[in-house]
Amino acid sequence: MDNRPRLFLTAAFLCGVLLTLGFKDFYPDLERRFRRRRVPINLVSGAGLDIDDRIDLEDRTRESSAKEYRDVEVAEGIAACVGNTPLFRVKSLSEETGCDILAKAEFLNGAGGSPKDRVALNMIKTAEEQGLLTPRSGDTIYEGTVGSTGISLATVCRARGYLAHICMPSDQATEKSDLLLKLGAVVDRVPPAPIIDPMHFVNRARSLAADHTADPKRPGRGYFADQFENQANWQAHYEGTGPEIFTQCGGKLDAFVAGAGTGGTIAGVARFLKSELPELRVVLADPQGSGLFNRVKNGVMFDTLEKEGTRRRSQVDSIIEGIGINRVTSNFEAGRELIDDAIKVSDDEAMAMARWLVEKDGIFTGGSSAVNCVATARLARQLGPGHRLVTILCDSGTRHLSKFWAQAGNIGGKADSRLDDIIGI
């Protein structure tokens, strides 16, 4: 048998072992020579280094990141979470109208979850500057409200060292008074009454504040916030909401639409935006039964539903809470001349819009926000495609379950609503 193949294999194996051992000793020198050829001579010599010098690299990115984190501002307390709310596109309304319909998400204010957070904070700050309130002195803030301002006041009061005493009509959604109690406020639910009645919720708050201040046995003073007449109301929106909208829109805006209760939001925003955009259209969204529509259109406060013998409620004959009124307030008058038009919205239209917003966009709001959206969509149809409109989403629908949403009903699996059926065009 020929053993030559075995000998060849054995010899090849031994040669491979010897080559491997030799290359192991030779490789470091080969690698050094290769790297010398790859390093640009001018870079090394320019750095004042010899070819064989060792260069150590340090990672400084962590130091830089830590410094950036240290520079991030942290909000100081819940009151610092008020304002700078997002502005977002309402996709369904924008697509249906061909306009850019944007909503200011005021329900995301960090204290009481409504635009009244801005008002409550500014009224308290202004009173402190005027020496009318002193934190943690026993001072109590009294206010007459249908709910949202009371919730904002109760929250901000606790944050700044005050107590809150809220008077509200007994026909408002019970969620609001329940929440006020959980926030530590004293709550008086009084029967609906005309503004001339001493027991009207606003008048009662005013008298309770005066009684507190006059009582030497009670600690601190009573301060009546007076949101309907307090100029700090519209000023909060002139200094905050208006500039935010202008900045978020990049200065490009054709119309602003909002409802009015005290009138502070529409007046303050209008005063700022009109100073920057003189051609801007400001339009009031008014629920049925309110007199503000006629105040804008005809200069008088009157609505056919408010005739003697037909009024069911003290404020407006509507299930909408928070907007609509039948008396002149100084806050509304602060911007009335800047309001170009008014759109009347029925309860049925508001409920249909509220269902639409859930059905199409997943947006769950209260009645006042739905009124705003009906008016905005109707105005968009009038202006035509290509315009940009902004409105306000005031608060969450969770505050309106027992009243507005109890009548609006459940959405179920419905997804076939038509916008023109809602806005009547």
Image: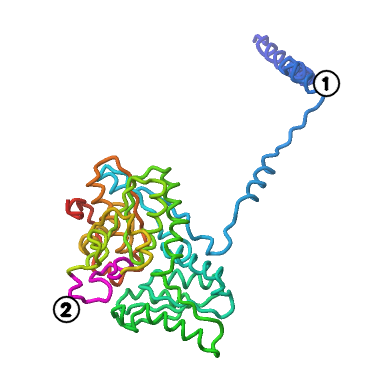
Q: Amino acid at mark 1?
A: Asp
On the image, the x and y values in percent for residue 148 come to 39, 69
156, above or below 168, in the image: above
Q: Secondary structure at mark 1?
A: loop
Whether residue 14 appears in magenta in the rendering, the answer is: no
On the image, the x and y values in percent for residue 20 come to 74, 19
Image quadrant occupied by the N terminus: top right
What secondary structure predominates along the stretch shown in magenta? Answer: loop
Q: Is residue 177 left or right of residue 62?
A: left
Neighbours of disc 2 within 10 Å: few (<14), some (14-19), many (20+): few
Q: Is residue 185 left or right of residue 349?
A: right
On the image, the x and y values in percent for residue 44 come to 77, 20
Q: Residue at x 64, y 49 (%)?
A: 71
Whether residue 307 appears in magenta in the rendering, the answer is: yes
Q: Amino acid at mark 2?
A: Gly
Any mark on residue 309, and which? 2
284, above or below 276, in the image: below
357, above or below 289, in the image: above
Say which quarter of the image contains residue 106.
bottom left
CB of mark 2 within 8 Å of CB of mark 1? no
Q: Residue at x 36, y 67 (%)?
A: 262
The answer to whether residue 361 shows anywhere in this view is: yes
Q: Which residues are magenta?
A: 305-327
Q: Along the line of sight, which residue is nearer the eye, 175 or 326?
A: 326
Which is more N-terminal, label 1 or label 2?
Answer: 1
- Residue furthest bottom as drawn: 217
Q: Along the line of sight, which residue is nearer the eye, 255 or 104?
A: 255
Neighbours of disc 1 within 10 Å: few (<14), some (14-19), many (20+): few
Any mark on residue 50, and which? 1
